[in-house]
Amino acid sequence: MARQLTESDLEAYLDEALSVDMMSTVEQALRADAELVRKLAKINARRDAGVHSLGEIWRRHRLSCPTREQLGNYLLGVLDKSATAFVKFHLNVSGCRTCQANLDDLNTRHADEPSIVDSRRKKYFQSSAGHLSRRR
Amino acid sequence: MCPLAPSDQLLVARIRRGEPEAWNELIARFEGRLLAFVEGRLGRRTAGEDVVQETFLGFLTSLPNFQDSRPLESYLFSIAAHKLTDHLRREGRRPTIPMTLGNTSGQWEPPARGRAVSSVARSGERRELEETAIVEALNQQIDRLRGRDEWEKLACLELLFVRGWANRDVATELKMTEQRVANFKFEFISRVRTLVRKQGLPEDVFPELHEEA
């Protein structure tokens, strides 16, 4: 591991918010490092006591994330230079998993056959719509 | 990202009324990005679809507790993260982390120095008030940076506060001096602290706002 894991990285790990590569790195490290497990338990206990950190609120509310529209413009190459540099940084250095998912989705939207997408959406709808009608 | 957008507010209100078209609309809008989020970790389409399905069910189940102060997308992603975590635990890929420290009291203790009692074991309601206030303060600062095209500063603050990097590491990554990083940090902390104070919150709520630059 090139850089030591920070407390914020561990918080993000608990929230499934690190990049996919970082998540795997932490999982591997956890199997061999009891101290790391203790650190994560400490974060759990702190959260349980109702104490939050600025970083986790920032991440949870996605305060500095580009909008989906900006990500779309980034893909089209029509963002200005400095905003493009920030999006690149946000994805590759900050490792924002949610923005990466949005970008992947925008990138592959037309890759699936419309009929496959349609049947997937129908499956989601049919398995949940019963819960919707019970709220009426 | 701001609190719930008016169009999302309307969509959620229609779902609360039980309108199937609104529910269909939400699924169509979010399923692709949620699937990309879970599939990236699972590497398998079918398992990914199962987790997304559980996410939508989880959304409907938790709808009575959903608050308009939270963006819809980040709420859905947080449910997906929980469902994904459960799935990975069941597969044995994600180790279980104990909820307590296993010390004599079994409780978390704040660092002895510089941590006031008011920051410990606060009620859920109090916690939400603090969260809303800090989100507003941070949003003001971040919007200000965006409006002034100060992207380098925003990148610096992301690494400091979201990733928790040390000044030295941030300076190396962004190819700037440590002094410049410290200046950005000091300026940001001062502004947010002032905004937090204006909202009537005790200043010790967020220890990060009292660290040395």
Image (cartoon, coloured by chain):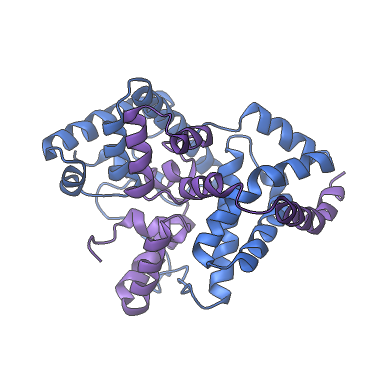
Chain colours: A purple, B blue
Q: Is residue A47 visible?
A: yes
Residue B81 at x, y = what percent?
55, 57
Nearer to us in this view, B139 or B99: B139
Residue A129 at x, y = what percent?
82, 52
Residue plotted at (37% across, 43% down):
A90
Q: Is B205 on the left or on the right of B78, as rendered?
A: left
Nearer to us in this view, B35 or B157: B35
Q: Is residue B206 visible?
A: no
Measured along the vertical axis of the image, is residue B66 above or below residue B141? below
Residue B196 at x, y = what percent?
39, 29
Number of numbered tags placed on the structure image? 0
Measured along the vertical axis of the image, is residue B211 above or below residue B38? above
Q: Is B1 on the left or on the right of B15, as rendered?
A: left
Among the 4 quarters of the image, the one containing residue B107: bottom left
Residue plotted at (34% across, 49% down):
A92
Residue plotted at (41% across, 63% down):
A23
Q: Residue furthest top?
A: B148
Among the 4 quarters of the image, the one containing residue B39: bottom right
Query: Which quadrant of the rendered structure holds the C terminus of chain B?
Result: top left
Q: Is B26 on the left or on the right of B21, as rendered?
A: left
Residue A119 at x, y = what percent?
76, 56
